[in-house]
Amino acid sequence: MAERKRVAPYAPASAVSEFFDHIRYVKTPDKVDSNLLLDYGISKSQTFPVLSTLRFLDIIEPDGTPTTAFRALQVGGEEFTAALRELVERGYADLFGRLDVSRDSKDKLKNYFARNYSPATAERATTLFLDLCGEAGIPTAPTPTGEGSQKRAASQGPKRQSGSRAGSSNPPPPPPPPSPPDGSRVAIELRLTEADLELMDATDIEAVFTAAAKIQVARTKALSRARNVEKEGKGE
């Protein structure tokens, strides 16, 4: 039996799908690192778990060098599905050897990750595994809500709801209020759809609104300085 890998990947499925989508349209890089993932549009908080996932699946070497598997995924359609299936079945060989993923429940999968890897990341590792199976065309047992891998087929698109946002009922912070009539405050408008929020975890959402607040403060200060300069120029 192959040696068990020490850390099971637990990256958000949406970030991994975004990576797969992006590499179809770019040349093979010399090295895959956090800076490259940022260029691909993956958030900073997700770069480490995505890199861990790519190493686990042997898509990149430990030093970030792309493997032949990386190039095999730079395609679409059935070729991509077949290439990913081979990587998933090889990377999770121990799991496939112990469980029948087409019949065993999500709880059994979660218990496997908890026992063999880490209880702290078992839920996220299970969610990623099921989504990878969905993209690779590997049948899995339907969950209690009917979200088996068959319903997460590639025809639905790569952007799927990540486990960390599933069932969340907490509304996001409201955007800044409009500017007062005297123009003493600069307002910015931030539009996020429900689909956007489903692809973001709590850290990402907090970062968005923190950045928006900083932009508002910076613009207000800049406007104030410009008015002071204008007043000085008029000798007021």
Image (tube, rainbow, N blue to C red):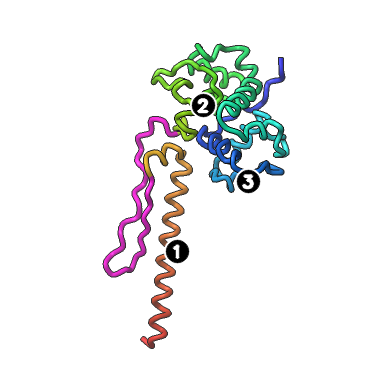
Mark 2 or mark 3, earlier in chain? 3
Name the mark on residue 175. Answer: none
Q: Residue 44, located in which quarter of the rendered image?
A: top right
Residue extent of the magenta highlight: 165-192
Q: In x, y percent, where is residue 135?
A: 53, 26
In the picture of the structure, the residue carrying the numbered disc 2 is 131
Residue holding disc 1: 218
Residue 117 showing in the rendered view? no
Type of amino acid under label 3: Leu
Q: Which residue is mark 3?
A: 36
- Say if 10 sits above or below 31 in the image: above
**Can see residue 35?**
yes
Asked which secondary structure carries label 3, the reply is helix
On screen, 231 above or below 156? below
Q: Label 3 vs label 1: CA separation?
A: 29 Å
- Tell me which residue sits at (63%, 47%) in the image: 35
